[in-house]
Amino acid sequence: MLYIIGGVSRSGKSLLAHKILKEKLIPFFPLDGLIGMLTHSAPEHGVRHQNDFVDKSEKTWKFSKELFKYLFKTQELYLVEGDCILPKQIAELQVDYPQEIKSCFMGYTTLTAKQKLDLVRMYNKGEEDWTNKHDDEAMLEMIEAMIVYSKYLKGECEKYNIPFFDVSENFEKVQDEAYEFLIG
């Protein structure tokens, strides 16, 4: 089984992935690693962390699709997480691997950018947290884009019948629901 968690930054994808990793010992690959590799080793593909979310997902698809195919062939269980995967890409994989994928997306559609920024600052991960490099004005702009992307993903998930977990309200409860959906 290949578990895939997609969604926006700061929606709890990594927290969920690490919980699954810790409790179920399922190997894990963060797609941020693929983005970093392409950014630094193959700049001709135009993939950057700061790309528009949909554009980044489409530019990385041929690479992430090959990664998924490799995992289907070589791994009994694996977990992949990232913001550079789209519901339509999951639907494409499900054509060839209908019983071998369990996927969901996470986002926040009802919070304001200011509400989300307050949460981001409150639950800061310390020195290594990438949000520390940005002032509130820059973060608000990024969060606005993430809210728009969350709404886009929610609509696409409905279109392709893929679960979308909105963490706008009761983050912990929704995390638990996503965990139960994937592993329960």
Image (cartoon, rainbow, N blue to C red):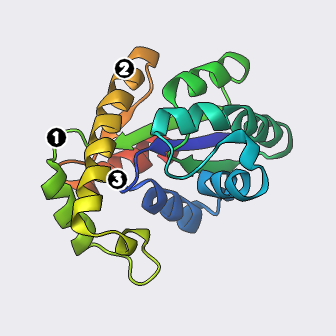
Q: Is residue 131 above or below residue 159?
A: below
Picture quadrant where residue 92 is located: top right
Residue neighbourhood size for the residue with mark 2, other residues' Cα within 10 Å, grouped as few (<14), some (14–19), many (≥20): few
Q: Looking at the image, is mark 3 or mark 2 nearer the viewer? A: 2
Q: Is residue 157 visible?
A: yes
- Which residue has dot 3 on it? 176
Q: Is residue 98 visible?
A: no
Q: Looking at the image, is mark 1 or mark 2 nearer the viewer? A: 1
Residue at screen point 34% across, 53% down: 175
Q: Front-most of 54 and 81?
A: 54
Res 158 label: 2
Q: Looking at the image, is mark 1 or mark 3 nearer the viewer? A: 1
Q: Residue furthest front?
A: 44
The residue type indicated by label 3 comes to: Asp
The spot of residue 81 in percent (x, y) is 56, 50
Labels 1 and 3: the sequence-earlier one: 1
Mark-to-mark CA distance, 1 and 3: 19 Å
Labels 1 and 2: the sequence-earlier one: 1
- Which residue has dot 1 on it? 110
Q: Front-most of 82 and 3?
A: 82
The residue type indicated by label 2 comes to: Glu
Mark-to-mark CA distance, 3 and 2: 21 Å
Labels 3 and 2: the sequence-earlier one: 2
Q: From the viewer's perspective, tell me whether residue 110 is left or right of residue 11.
A: left
Q: Work out which quarter of the rendered image holds the N terminus and state it.
A: top right
The spot of residue 46 in percent (x, y) is 65, 42
Q: From the viewer's perspective, tell me whether residue 132 is left or right of residue 82.
A: left
The spot of residue 94 in percent (x, y) is 64, 22
Mark-to-mark CA distance, 1 and 2: 17 Å
Mark 1: secondary structure: loop
Residue neighbourhood size for the residue with mark 3, other residues' Cα within 10 Å, grouped as few (<14), some (14–19), many (≥20): some
The residue type indicated by label 1 comes to: Thr
